[in-house]
Image (cartoon, rainbow, N blue to C red):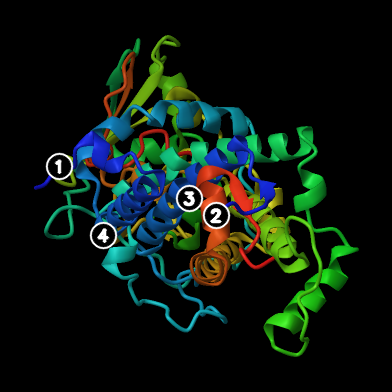
């Protein structure tokens, strides 16, 4: 590589041409660039964007309910395991733990005896598609009350039997009245493709935050991230 | 040879212009990467009227971020600077009075029409104008409108649950996402014409955006 001596570029016109060519080269070279080297640096930038999201969203606002009959005929199914994750429903338990005064271990029958809530809302996937479904289940706030969760536990972690998939939420969004542990979908029992026997459901955040195939709900004093969050998706991810 | 200087581009304008070049290209490229995760508009189980290329991916060279998460990170990083830089530009243009010779206002319609006729060879003599002709004012003012619309439509699809009135105003989430996408192509159309006009037709304009002075043609 030939490095021009300083005196070679003192001519302003020539310098501008050189600068223009370098800029064009940078732009052309940037085409198709994945940007891996700066992904890590961009991670800390999530924080100001999260604060902006908290400023925009009113945490007590209810998501708009959809009219009856508006449910989508086709609602996509997602799991990370190579095969559809299934479990023996009789042996299945939902553990409610972490910073709680009375830890719970609920069978599906016990879960279904807790106060029941139904929401019919538009679902948003981070990929860009939407669909509508009706979900029936128990509010996470109901579990927090039943287990007497420590008010100082600022985070709620949801774990599953889908190859260890998990995600964690800020307490405020998890305890929102439209955030449910759902065991029913569109008037039927939740199907294995949608996270049976029970899954988290809320449209306050993108779909990957709604953990399917639930096994644990933990009230925690610290943020424990999540499966997709570790792979690059945003943690707060509010809609 | 000394040529008469017709006008100057203030440094604030030149700086915000070049910063915007970087931020806008990054927003478009990362946006196309995000779009690629679902290169269609229809709600699941429905058809969408107006996008014949549904399902076709965007070319790799036009994308920034490598995959959806990377594209989102870049988009929500550059978003801040794209908006901030745009606000600084608007604040400067209004505070300094620069808007008087830049902003397209209804009386400029006549000049824009005359200039269009001149470019189409339907008019022999070039119309008289100051810093910018009517068509330039229209195009540059148009980019400000596009910038504002890109932010509004972007906010609508970023916060459809928190700000339902905004996505509702735009015809719903699916429609808002489509508007956001159309604005990209309006920007791309502007960029193509802008590059042709400043690199081929009037290269003095490029020079003025770099060093600040726009010289009259040598024969004038």
Query: Is label 1 in a helix, a strand or a loop?
Result: loop
Dot 2 and dot 3 within a common chain: yes
Cα separation between marks 2 and 4: 44 Å
Q: Is residue B167 left or right of residue A235?
A: right
On what subunit does the disc labeled 1 rest? A
Cα separation between marks 2 and 3: 32 Å
Query: Image quadrant for the N terminus of chain B?
Result: bottom right
Query: Is label 2 in a helix, a strand or a loop?
Result: loop
Question: Label 4: which residue?
Answer: A32
Question: Label 3: which residue?
Answer: B21
Cα separation between marks 4 and 1: 28 Å
| Among the 4 quarters of the image, the one containing residue B220 | bottom right
Query: Is label 3 in a helix, a strand or a loop?
Result: helix
Q: Residue B1, labelled with which disc?
A: 2
Q: Nearer the viewer, mark 1 or mark 2?
A: 2
Q: Nearer the viewer, mark 2 or mark 3?
A: 2
The reply to whether callout 3 and callout 4 are in contact (CB within 8 Å) is no
């Amino acid at each position: 590589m030939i490095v021009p001596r300083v005196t070679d570029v003192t001519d302003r016109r020539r310098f501008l041409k050189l600068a223009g060519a370098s800029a064009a080269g940078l732009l052309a070279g940037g085409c198709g660039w994945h940007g891996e080297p700066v992904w890590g640096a961009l991670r800390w930038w999530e924080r100001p964007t999260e604060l902006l999201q908290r400023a925009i969203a009113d945490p007590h606002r209810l998501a708009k309910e959809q009219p009856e009959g508006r449910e989508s005929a086709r609602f996509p199914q997602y799991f990370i395991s190579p095969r559809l994750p299934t479990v023996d429903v009789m042996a299945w338990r939902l553990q409610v733990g972490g910073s709680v005064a009375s830890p719970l271990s609920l069978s599906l029958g016990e879960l279904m005896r807790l106060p029941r809530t139904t929401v019919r809302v538009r679902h948003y996937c981070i990929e860009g598609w939407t669909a509508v479904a009706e979900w029936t289940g128990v509010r996470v706030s109901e579990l927090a009350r039943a287990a007497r969760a420590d008010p100082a536990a600022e985070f709620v972690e949801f774990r599953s039997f889908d190859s260890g998939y998990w995600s964690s939420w800020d307490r405020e969004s998890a305890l929102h009245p439209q955030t449910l542990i759902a065991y029913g979908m569109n008037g039927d029992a939740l199907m294995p493709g949608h996270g049976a026997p029970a899954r988290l459901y809320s449209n306050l955040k993108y779909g990957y935050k709604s953990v399917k195939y639930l096994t644990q709900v933990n009230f925690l004093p610290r943020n424990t991230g999540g499966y997709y969050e570790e792979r690059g998706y945003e943690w707060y991810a509010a809609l | 040879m000394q040529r008469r200087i017709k006008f100057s581009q203030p440094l604030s304008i030149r700086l915000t212009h070049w910063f915007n070049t970087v931020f806008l290209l990054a927003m478009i490229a990362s946006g196309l990467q995000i779009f690629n995760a679902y290169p269609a508009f229809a709600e699941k189980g429905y058809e969408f009227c107006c996008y014949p290329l549904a399902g076709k991916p965007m070319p790799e060279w036009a994308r920034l971020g490598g995959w959806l998460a990377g594209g989102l990170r870049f988009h929500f990083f550059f978003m801040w600077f794209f908006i901030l830089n745009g606000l600084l530009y608007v604040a400067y243009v209004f505070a300094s009075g620069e808007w008087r010779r830049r902003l397209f206002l209804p009386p400029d319609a006549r000049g824009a029409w005359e200039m269009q006729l001149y470019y189409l060879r339907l008019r022999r003599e070039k119309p008289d104008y100051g810093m910018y002709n009517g068509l330039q004012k229209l195009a540059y003012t148009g980019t400000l409108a596009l910038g504002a619309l890109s932010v509004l439509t972007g906010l609508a699809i970023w916060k459809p649950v928190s700000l339902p009135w905004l996505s509702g105003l735009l015809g719903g989430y699916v429609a808002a996402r489509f508007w956001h996408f159309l604005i990209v192509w309006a920007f791309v159309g502007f960029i193509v014409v802008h590059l042709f006009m400043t690199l081929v037709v009037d290269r003095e304009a490029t020079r003025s955006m770099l060093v600040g002075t726009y010289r009259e043609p040598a024969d004038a």
